[in-house]
């Protein structure tokens, strides 16, 4: 007599799975920290793991470019087009607002025409390498949620490294290497993100996908593929977010991989468009970046669903009786048990791991 019940439960579960598959955005967002519920004891709070919405993190960064005198325009300079060395009608003058290309133009709105961009000085000191570091700092831990995209106004560089820091720029680790020839530039075999598996997701690779050949109007981006890495656990359309959240919850190295305080773009060799550098026209060789996209959220240890930017600083608006920029400790008088980060599990509400008042017995998490 239990057979029909089993079928009914199976049908119900199939329906739930179907709904979750087709509406992944409707579950598991962890955007509510607490809600009121009725119990036998009356109205009480039900606490849940929560996190802020993803947002454009370039609105909140500080950028620095090294060496300090590498931005074009001081002194004024004329540039030639890479594809046509006789087309030399581009000027850069730091004292003229219409002709200046300062670093902040990498992060402004790109709906205008003509496009705005940062530009380096040209490779006048060839064969000495033209080296530039572009450092983006948030003074806050953030979690990446989408691809990092660098859009070049010039040709894409022939050699470049993307690096991350988790300790506010004290130490750096490579995220990915980029080159026209990975073996020659970095003694690494060329790979793509499609070569990675769940077991090798944390491997640092060198890719040639974003460096080879002339670069024209619609082919100027360099990417660090976050979503393709997520897809190794969540599936190609990110429908199985439960699997990804479970991995992030139980594998610290994986979660740390997508967590940063700073990013650094190291430009090592500009586009040359040929096997040999034309030493008679070095004004063809430079870097120019029109846009950098970094999508992410404040890391709040699953104890906040909002993050505010006040006094030039990001900080979490902590819930669950926690405090600190990342909600990383219990509030005073709420240290009845050791602080713990929230947990994504069990899906879809997670576990809040609230801090409790001093000197009281065990309570629900």
Image (cartoon, rainbow, N blue to C red):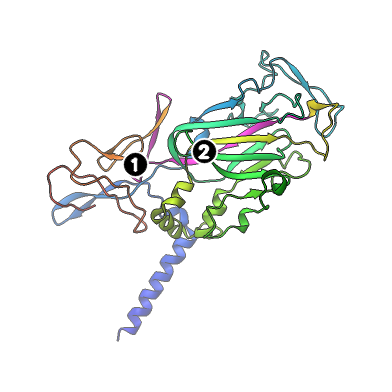
At label 1, counting other C-alpha atoms closer than 10 Å, the crowd grade (few under 14, some 14-19, many 20 or more) is many
Is 51 left, or right, of 130 in this rendering?
left
Task: Label 2: state its secondary structure.
Answer: loop
Q: Which quadrant of the view contains residue 97?
A: top right
- Camera-side residue: 307 or 175? 175
Is 196 left, or right, of 276 in this rendering?
left
Q: List the single residue furthest toward the bottom.
A: 1
Q: List the single residue furthest toward the top.
A: 95
Picture coordinates of residue 288, whole percent (x, y):
69, 30
- The residue lying at 52 percent from left, 54 percent from top is 230
Quarter of the figure with the N terminus: bottom left
At label 2, counting other C-alpha atoms closer than 10 Å, the crowd grade (few under 14, some 14-19, many 20 or more) is some
The mark found on residue 304 in the picture is 1
Q: Which residues are magenta?
A: 285-312
* Magenta-span inclusion, residue 271: no
Q: Which residue is mark 2?
A: 172
- The residue lying at 69 percent from left, 47 percent from top is 182
Q: Which quadrant of the view contains residue 135?
A: top right
Is 264 drawn above or below residue 7 in the view shown? above
């Amino acid at each position: 007599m239990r057979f029909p019940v089993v079928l009914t439960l199976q049908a119900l579960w199939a329906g739930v799975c179907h709904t979750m598959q087709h509406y992944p955005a409707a579950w598991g967002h962890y955007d509510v920290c607490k809600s009121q519920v009725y119990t036998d004891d009356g109205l009480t709070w039900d606490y849940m793991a929560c996190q802020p919405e993803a947002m454009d993190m370039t609105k909140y960064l500080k950028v620095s470019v090294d060496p300090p005198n590498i931005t074009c325009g001081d002194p004024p300079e004329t540039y030639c087009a890479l594809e046509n060395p006789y087309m030399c009608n581009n000027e850069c003058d730091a004292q003229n607002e219409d002709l200046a290309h300062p670093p902040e133009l990498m992060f402004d709105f790109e709906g205008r025409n003509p496009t705005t961009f940062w530009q380096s000085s040209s490779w006048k000191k060839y064969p000495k390498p033209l080296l530039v570091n572009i450092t983006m700092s948030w003074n806050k831990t953030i979690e990446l949620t989408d691809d990092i995209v660098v859009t070049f106004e010039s040709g894409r560089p022939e050699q470049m490294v993307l690096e991350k820091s988790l300790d506010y720029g004290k130490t750096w680790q490579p995220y990915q290497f980029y080159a026209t020839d990975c073996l020659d530039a970095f003694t690494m075999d060329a790979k793509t993100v499609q070569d990675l598996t769940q077991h090798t997701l944390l491997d640092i690779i060198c890719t040639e996908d974003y460096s080879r050949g002339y670069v024209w109007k619609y082919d100027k981006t360099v990417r660090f593929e976050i979503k393709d890495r997520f897809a190794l656990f969540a599936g190609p359309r990110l429908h199985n977010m439960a699997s990804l959240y479970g991995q992030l919850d139980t594998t610290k190295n994986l979660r740390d991989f997508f967590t940063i305080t700073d990013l650094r773009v190291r430009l090592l060799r500009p586009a040359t468009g040929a096997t040999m550098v034309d030493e008679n026209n070095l004004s063809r060789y430079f870097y120019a970046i029109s846009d950098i996209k970094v999508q992410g959220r404040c890391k709040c240890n699953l104890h906040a669903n909002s993050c505010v930017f006040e006094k030039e600083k990001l900080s979490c608006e902590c819930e669950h009786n926690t405090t600190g920029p990342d909600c990383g400790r219990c509030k005073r008088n709420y240290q009845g048990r050791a602080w713990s980060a929230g947990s994504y599990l069990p899906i879809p509400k997670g576990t809040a791991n609230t801090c409790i008042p001093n000197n009281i017995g065990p309570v629900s998490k």
